[in-house]
Image (cartoon, grey):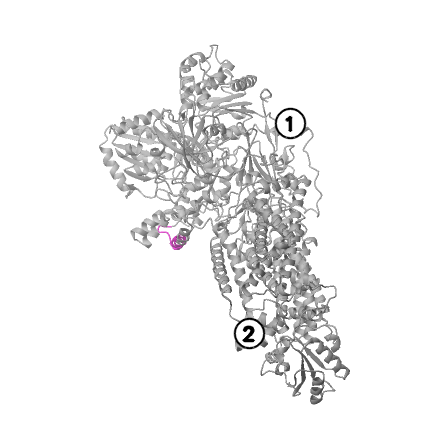
């Protein structure tokens, strides 16, 4: 169990048994525009398994990489409705079933006074769903990733834009990929260990 | 889908990021605050804030040990400064989420350099506010858990969900939680930046742990942006609901001066009003401490002044409406309570409120005041004071002379009342200064996003002359 | 039977306490500390100066609690199982007894829980109680457990014992001879067995003198009758027979009678429902008293002008053929008033009643007697009997005593009870005079007299000692103890027996033997009956046939009726807080507001708005009053409706030697009170410029709003009899009910408790407030906290003035939780700590309350009380014995309020269940406020039973709900105040 968690977190020593030795080839670009251009060329060249790294989200990258739409919205809706019904059940069961009290001669349960809490619980659960959903989809937290083996990976959170052609790409040949990225105008290209 | 690309509708003139900064300049500038030594001014701030925060805990300790009697509360004025301060703080806590969420949805790019600090302010304000609902109770040691729907061993009773105070418990705790999540999610990419720049192993560990291993991969950004949008979407109705629900504490009672339907919109407007005032106060201070003129530009501040002017007008209009309705209702008690506010024993509180909330913002009609740091600083302080008086007027003047003249009374604060209030301000400032010191006070990645658009719009040169 | 319970009690109480503690730690300091029972300043709460000391004291309290709790009594215990027949553990026992004040007795029934007397009720069989009591009698129970009581026989402050004292006395007595040097000073007492002892003493010491003195007494009333009829007599009034009552400076509903009888009789004539026409009350008075507040017409007059008024009235009525001289002072308005009054009186010959207050000189009483005679009221509304106490001019007697003391003619002086050194006329320095002789003080607490005496003897509380007392009409009762003396005190009766040299000196033997000698044959049976019923059959005095020769009497008294000098005069009144000082250490009374001024924890120099304006005086300005070369200081307070040029002062404050509660509370006015101006007299007034903080429970006096000047309706409804008659024809007006948003809760089944309060009967005497305090363990918070608006009374009396400021009318409105069916407090409580019982009571769950005070804010009647601090933190151990075991003692931080004495309802419910599951009868459950009310203004019961009294009252046309428009549907409704004005005066 603990093992599983630790390896999920990818903590040093618990890396998930890496089959292949190479993660892929990473090239570095100065501007988002250069990056986009490189991705498009790579796609044209037939590469399919690519990942881009940037200090801020860049419009068009997803389309360029051909990434699917995020399913986060659907998750959140479900949990929102869950919160709503939880609120109704809570207020109805506690007031009208489990412990009946005459309060100011009012009905034991009514919708009007229940609205605020219905709203709040819906929002609360939605928010939790959003964040946990995000963590799940983006595999956070993950404390180990091959990217960190790239010598200039820090630049990705500063002012550089990286493009990785991953080893699992059927068309992947380390040398070819390296040359290819250089040809795209990569300022610094490396083959990165997994 | 959140679209940070160039938006032709948007005039970025003057640019939101100035001084021809590059991406790395932005990184360096903001990170240096966290990485470098704290300036003397920061220590001066702490020297003021920390002792006050300690005073708060002293007062609370005395309060819990002795009883509510150490405050000025009495019958008929069952609520005094306690709930006044609660509403005041909650109000201040509105600007943060409002700026991050609503301005985000409205694509107001100028929010980027202030939203992080504003959100932090929200959290700390809500924390200060949350102190009061708990400690204003006669038996906080029970209230602490009886106010939540936990099956309790004691009487096997449940809460009364008809009570606005119960709604408060849910509204405030939800608001606090969601704001915290929103804030943290926004922080993740910047924490990653700090991790990557970290020089000492300790920093690397801490920021590494906090940034959860963020890499800024396209996949992550994709989900991240949707998540951020969703949170913004959730926070927007939430921020509007919180003060509406707080206003229900009063609106659903039958006390003249409380029993009124105008409260929800009126309270929300007031909250935004005071919230922005507090943001301006803090931003001007932050600029002064860290010299962030290029990031928190005059444009940001001027926009906030405009918001204050607008909300100030709404609040003033609400004051007028209250009087009109009181007269129009032809209800003797209503009419009396409002006249009593203006001309009764608490006239001074009422007119201070009018002066600070209605008169003061009028200066913002003139650009001269909207663009003068000292002017907007002083005016924002006035507005903060005025909004405190608004809550005090609503609570104290309505309670002290209600239906039966036989039980009329008067409220006088004690030194503990004052200490508790000043103490929360100390706590608030302490937390805010710590935030400035140890976390990126400005959303690095978002500023870069804006910068990128400026670049594309050919307004600045991010790379040339940049760091190679 | 009583013997038995006493045996147990001796183990349950005082003696065991202290012995065990002394044994425990025998250091002198500790012993002394223990005897103080609580360190100095223990009741700091009462002047909440330093809270810090409280922590210490609380610790001390726990210490004591532990010690007392873990000790077994030393004496042999008689197990309760073999104890009182019919005694069920946990069920209270009730004993009939009687107490007296100012020579007038009231029959009581005292409730004892496990041997602790905890609650006082009136004895329905007693003619002067009729089941009710006044506030003071309610508060007596607290005095019993006063930790500051005298606890130890002392000689000049040095600890001694009864044995030493007795041996000292035997020696002193041996030197007394014919008793020329023996003086005995005691309060007015009407006690058959004491009279017997007096006779013995007089026989043994023919030249001894027994002086009786009370700061408040009926001397002038009795003397007035003597002037009129040639013999000292006590008037007996029948207010229930009088259609027209004229009270001349007589607060007969308030402090000028210490009994409930007049109120009961008067209130019986204020209920139109009962068919009899409403009586009409005229009041002529300097101070604005509760009697004046009840009056249909009120004339403000200085006390010294009353003689002129009486004379003018006598003239109008032509009480004798002879022409009467008229004194000036009776102005134009007065003339019109008196003419109308006279006309009204003449129209009700034989059914009218004129009476004067004890402050008025004997001549005025004589005049009043003539008037009643002329109106043919003698034998109808007023009759005369011999007074129950020895008639004597006590002022002359004390003057004589002072002379003897000064001249050193007194060798031994007994001061049996009371506090003469504090209350005797200021002509002499009594403390000094007492020190000139061997003074023996029998005192209840370590008061001024105690301090001045050679021998200091602790006096037993009336609930601790045997005795017998006569009511004003002679009706005798046995004073039956409820508990063994907590601090080994003895009664005046026992000391008298000692003086008389009786062999048997136990109160029981004295009383028993006296009555046995009276009854002869079936004494035993009669004794049992007397104890059981609380009254002794056939002891009431017969009315004396009297006839006055008007002309002769007038000739005799006219010279004495002088025109009053102009200028300011002072009038001395008993106080609603301390009466004459005897309740000064009683926190309940100190905190119960004065009915008219709403002042607490203080007395004040009351004066009219006009006089205040003239003198440039405002509330709280300290005045210097001087008369006969004596000065006192007293803060001024403006009282609307007070007579001009007159200043009313309340006795019994500024006690120098007193317990922690009363010490230094208020200002001593006795310093101004000499023989010459014993009741009233001219005085000089000067503003000292000093300010003094007076605290009242009600800040706003009227129903008129400031700023708008609008009157608030729907709070107090008031009609004239005429208006009401017209209204009644239409039947009860039902306000068209506002439509509800949700279906009503169904209250149509089972008991549904409700209350009706008759504003036309309520005189605002505070009895309900104190009764509620005693029944519901309501804490006392002290002057400072009341000043902050934190008083805890569950029921309060709202007093509203109406009309012009100088001569207003007043209405009293008892206000407790009205038990709204749609209670605004309930819906706002987040933890549901206050909710409705199916029987319609708005109940508080103290242990669920977290104290948000939201309910208080949302209560339109502001009847909820919050424990802002731990009011019970420093309650001394012994003081805890007064707590009602059926009611929780609330902790700090919780809300509390009236709950219709739910504990009494449950008691009756279980009783009814035990008696074969019968339904609870109407009138079986009495709330504490209802039971004590001398005016029967409060009626409680099941509103679902159409035959119940409360249901009937609620059907009356004058029934209304306070703040009806809020639609809170209160279960307590009010019956409108009616006024019965004289058409000629409106």
* Residue B331 place in picture, x, y as percent: 66, 39
Q: Residues within 10 Å of mark 1 (few under 14, many from 20)?
A: few
Q: Chain of mark 2?
A: B
| Residue C17 relative to residue A69: left or right | left
The residue located at (50%, 63%) in the rendering is B41
Q: Is residue C845 magenta?
A: no
Which residues, given as a range, are shown in magenta?
A: C60-76
Q: Quadrant of the C terminus of chain B?
A: bottom right
Q: Are marks 1 and 2 in contact (CB under 8 Å)?
A: no
Q: Is residue B160 visible?
A: no
The residue tagged with tag 2: helix, strand or loop? helix
* Residue C113 place in picture, x, y as percent: 46, 46
| Residue A2 relative to residue C771: left or right | right
- The one of C211 and B406 positioned closer to us in this rendering: B406
Dot in front, 1 or 2: 2
State the CA–CA distance, disc 1 to disc 2.
Answer: 85 Å
Give the residue number, with chain letter if any, for mark 2: B206
* Residue C20 place in picture, x, y as percent: 35, 52
Quarter of image, res B303: bottom right
User: Taken as a whole, is the magenta stretch helix, strand or loop?
Assistant: helix
Q: Chain of mark 1?
A: C
Give the residue number, with chain letter if any, for mark 1: C723
- The one of C687 and C428 positioned closer to us in this rendering: C687
Q: Residues within 10 Å of mark 2 (few under 14, many from 20)?
A: some
| Residue B315 relative to residue C191: left or right | right
Quarter of image, res C582: top left
Judge whether C357 appears above or below C974 on screen.
Answer: above
């Amino acid at each position: 169990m603990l093992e599983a968690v630790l390896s999920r977190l990818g903590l040093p020593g618990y890396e998930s048994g890496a089959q292949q030795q190479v993660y892929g080839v990473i090239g570095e670009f100065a501007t988002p525009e250069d990056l986009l251009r490189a991705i498009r060329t790579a796609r044209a060249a037939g590469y399919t398994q690519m990942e881009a790294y940037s200090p801020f989200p860049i419009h068009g990258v997803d389309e360029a990489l051909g990434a699917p739409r995020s399913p986060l919205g659907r998750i959140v809706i479900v949990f929102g409705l869950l919160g709503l019904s939880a609120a109704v059940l809570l207020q109805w069961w506690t007031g009208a079933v489990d412990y009946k009290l005459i309060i100011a001669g009012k009905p034991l349960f009514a919708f009007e006074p229940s609205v605020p809490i219905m709203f709040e619980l819906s929002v609360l659960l939605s928010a939790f769903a959003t964040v946990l959903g995000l963590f799940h989809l983006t595999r956070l937290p993950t404390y180990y990733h091959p990217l960190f083996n790239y010598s200039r990976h820090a630049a990705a959170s500063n002012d550089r834009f990286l493009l990785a052609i991953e080893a699992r790409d059927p068309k992947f040949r380390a040398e070819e990929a390296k040359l290819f990225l250089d040809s795209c105008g990569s300022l610094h290209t490396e083959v990165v260990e997994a | 889908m959140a679209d940070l690309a160039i938006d032709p509708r948007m005039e970025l003139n003057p640019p939101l990021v100035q001084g021809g900064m590059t991406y790395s300049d932005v990184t360096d500038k903001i990170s240096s605050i966290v990485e470098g030594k704290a300036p003397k001014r920061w220590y001066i701030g702490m020297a003021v804030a920390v002792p006050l925060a300690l005073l708060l805990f002293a007062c609370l300790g005395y309060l819990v040990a002795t009883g509510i009697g150490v405050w000025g509360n009495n019958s008929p004025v069952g609520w005094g400064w306690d709930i006044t301060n609660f509403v005041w703080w909650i109000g201040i806590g509105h600007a943060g989420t409002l700026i991050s969420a609503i301005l985000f949805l409205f694509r107001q790019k100028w929010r980027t350099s202030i939203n992080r600090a504003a959100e932090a302010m929200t959290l700390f304000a809500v924390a200060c506010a949350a102190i009061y609902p708990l400690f204003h109770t006669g038996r906080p040691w029970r209230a602490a858990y009886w106010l939540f729907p936990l099956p309790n061993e004691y009487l096997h009773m449940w809460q009364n969900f008809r009570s606005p105070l119960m709604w408060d418990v849910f509204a405030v705790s939800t608001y606090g939680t969601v704001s915290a999540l929103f804030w943290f999610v926004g922080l993740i990419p910047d924490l990653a930046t700090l991790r990557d720049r970290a020089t000492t192993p300790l920093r690397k560990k801490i920021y590494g742990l906090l940034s959860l291993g963020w890499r800024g991969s396209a996949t992550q950004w994709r989900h991240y942006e949707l998540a951020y949008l969703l949170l913004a979407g959730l926070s927007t109705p939430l921020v509007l609901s919180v003060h509406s629900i707080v206003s229900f504490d009063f609106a659903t009672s039958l006390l003249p001066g409380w029993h009124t339907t105008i409260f929800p919109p009126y309270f929300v407007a007031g909250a935004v009003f005071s919230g922005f005032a507090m943001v301006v106060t803090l931003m001007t201070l932050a600029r002064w401490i860290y010299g962030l003129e290029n990031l928190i530009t005059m444009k940001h501040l001027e926009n906030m002044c405009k918001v204050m002017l607008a909300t100030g007008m709404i609040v003033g209009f609400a004051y007028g409406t209250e009087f009109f309705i009181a007269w129009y209702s032809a209800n003797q008690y209503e009419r009396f309570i409002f006249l009593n506010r203006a001309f009764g024993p608490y006239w001074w509180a009422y007119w201070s409120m009018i002066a600070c909330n209605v008169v003061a913002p009028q200066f913002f009609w003139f650009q001269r005041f909207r663009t003068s740091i000292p002017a907007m600083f002083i005016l924002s302080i006035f507005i903060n004071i005025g909004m405190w008086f608004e809550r005090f007027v609503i609570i104290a003047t309505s309670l002290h002379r209600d239906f039966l003249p036989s039980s009329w009374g008067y409220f006088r604060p004690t030194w503990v009342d004052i200490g508790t209030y000043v103490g929360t301000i100390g706590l608030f400032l302490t937390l805010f200064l710590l935030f400035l010191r140890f976390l990126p006070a400005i959303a690095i990645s978002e500023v870069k996003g804006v910068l990128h658009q400026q670049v594309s719009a050919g307004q600045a040169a991010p790379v040339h002359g940049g760091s190679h | 039977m009583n013997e038995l319970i006493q045996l147990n009690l001796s183990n349950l109480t005082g003696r065991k306490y202290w012995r065990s503690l002394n044994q425990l730690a025998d250091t002198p300091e500790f012993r002394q500390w223990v005897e103080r029972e609580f360190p100095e300043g223990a009741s700091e709460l009462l002047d909440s100066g330093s809270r810090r000391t409280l922590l210490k004291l609380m610790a001390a309290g726990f210490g004591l609690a532990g010690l007392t709790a873990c000790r077994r009594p030393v004496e042999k215990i008689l197990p309760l199982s073999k104890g009182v027949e019919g005694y069920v553990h946990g069920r209270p026992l009730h004993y009939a007894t009687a107490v007296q004040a100012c020579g007038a007795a009231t029959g009581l029934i005292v409730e004892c829980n496990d041997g602790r007397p905890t609650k006082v009720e009136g004895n329905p069989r007693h003619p002067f109680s009729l089941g009710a009591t006044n506030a003071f009698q309610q508060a007596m129970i607290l005095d019993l457990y006063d930790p500051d009581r005298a606890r130890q026989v002392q000689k000049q402050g040095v600890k001694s014992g009864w044995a030493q004292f007795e041996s000292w006395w035997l020696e002193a007595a041996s030197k007394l001879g014919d008793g020329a040097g023996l003086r005995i000073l005691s309060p007015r007492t009407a006690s058959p067995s004491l009279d017997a002892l007096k006779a013995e003493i007089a026989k043994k010491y023919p030249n001894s003198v027994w002086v009786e003195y009370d700061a408040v007494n009926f001397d002038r009333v009795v003397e007035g009758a003597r002037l009129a009829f040639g013999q000292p007599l006590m008037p007996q009034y029948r207010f229930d027979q009088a259609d027209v009552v004229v009270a001349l400076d007589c607060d007969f509903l308030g402090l000028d009678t210490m009994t409930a009888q007049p109120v009961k009789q008067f209130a019986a004539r204020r209920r139109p429902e009962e068919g009899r026409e409403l009586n009409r009350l005229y009041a002529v008075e300097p101070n604005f008293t509760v009697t004046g507040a009840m009056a249909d017409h009120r004339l403000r007059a200085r006390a010294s002008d009353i003689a002129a008024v009486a004379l003018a009235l006598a003239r109008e009525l032509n009480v004798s053929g002879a022409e009467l001289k008229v004194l000036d002072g009776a102005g134009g308005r007065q003339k019109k008033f008196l003419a109308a009054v006279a006309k009204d009186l003449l129209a009700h010959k034989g059914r009218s009643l004129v009476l004067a207050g004890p402050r008025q000189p004997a001549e005025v009483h004589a005049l009043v007697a003539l008037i009643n005679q002329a109106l043919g009221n003698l034998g109808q509304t007023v009759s005369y009997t011999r007074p129950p106490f020895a008639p004597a001019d006590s002022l002359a007697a004390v003057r004589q005593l002072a002379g003897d003391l000064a001249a050193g003619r007194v060798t031994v002086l007994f001061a049996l009870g009371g506090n003469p050194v504090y209350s005797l006329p200021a002509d002499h320095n009594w403390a000094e005079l007492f020190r000139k002789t061997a003074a023996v003080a029998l005192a209840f607490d370590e008061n001024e007299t105690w301090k001045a005496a050679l021998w200091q003897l602790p006096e037993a509380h009336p609930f601790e000692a045997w005795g017998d007392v006569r009511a004003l009409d002679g009706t005798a009762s046995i004073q039956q103890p409820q508990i063994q003396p907590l601090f080994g005190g003895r009664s005046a009766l026992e000391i008298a027996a000692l003086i008389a040299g009786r062999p048997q000196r136990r109160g029981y033997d004295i009383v028993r033997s006296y009555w046995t000698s009276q009854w002869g044959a079936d004494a035993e049976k009669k004794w049992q009956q007397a104890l059981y019923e609380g009254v002794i059959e056939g002891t009431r005095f017969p009315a004396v046939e009297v006839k006055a020769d008007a002309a002769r009497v007038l000739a005799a008294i006219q010279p004495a009726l002088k025109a009053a000098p102009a200028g300011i005069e002072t009038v001395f009144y008993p106080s609603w807080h301390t009466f004459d000082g005897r309740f000064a250490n009683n926190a309940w009374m100190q905190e119960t507001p004065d009915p008219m001024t709403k002042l607490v924890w203080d007395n004040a120099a009351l004066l009219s708005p006009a006089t205040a304006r003239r003198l440039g005086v405002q509330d709280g300005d300290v005045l210097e009053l001087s008369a006969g070369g004596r000065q006192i200081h007293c803060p001024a307070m403006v009282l609307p409706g007070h007579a001009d040029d007159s200043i009313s002062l309340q006795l019994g404050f500024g006690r120098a030697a007193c317990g922690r509660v009363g010490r230094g509370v208020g200002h001593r006015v006795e310093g101004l009170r000499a023989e010459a101006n014993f009741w009233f007299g001219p005085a000089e007034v000067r503003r000292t410029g000093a300010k003094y903080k007076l605290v009242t429970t009600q800040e706003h006096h009227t129903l008129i709003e400031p700023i708008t000047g609008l009157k608030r309706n729907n709070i107090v409804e008031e009609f004239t009899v005429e208006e009401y008659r017209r209204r009644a024809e239409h039947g009860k007006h039902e306000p068209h009910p506002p439509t509800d948003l949700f279906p009503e809760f169904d209250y149509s089944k089972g008991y549904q408790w409700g209350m009706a309060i008759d504003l036309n009967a309520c005189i605002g005497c505070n009895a309900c407030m104190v009764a509620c305090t005693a029944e519901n363990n309501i804490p006392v918070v002290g002057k400072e906290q009341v000043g902050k608006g934190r008083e805890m009374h569950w029921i309060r009396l709202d007093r509203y003035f109406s009309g012009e400021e100088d001569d207003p009318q007043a209405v009293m409105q008892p206000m407790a939780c009205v038990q709204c069916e749609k209670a605004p407090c309930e819906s706002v409580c987040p933890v549901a700590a206050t909710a409705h019982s199916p029987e319609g009571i708005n109940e508080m769950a103290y242990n669920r309350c977290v104290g948000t005070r939201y309910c208080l804010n949302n209560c339109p009647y502001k009847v909820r009380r919050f424990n802002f601090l731990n009011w019970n933190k420093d309650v001394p151990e012994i003081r805890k014995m007064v707590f009602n075991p059926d009611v929780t003692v609330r902790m700090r931080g919780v809300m509390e309020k009236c709950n219709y004495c739910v504990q009494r309802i449950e008691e009756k419910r279980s009783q009814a269940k035990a008696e074969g599951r019968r339904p609870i009868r109407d009138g079986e459950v009495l709330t504490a406020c209802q039971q004590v009310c001398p005016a029967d203004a409060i009626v409680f019961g099941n509103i679902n039973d159409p035959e119940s009294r409360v249901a009937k009252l609620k059907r009356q046309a004058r029934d209304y709900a306070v703040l009806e428009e809020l639609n809170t549907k209160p279960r307590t409704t009010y019956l409108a105040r009616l006024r019965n004005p004289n058409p000629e005066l409106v």
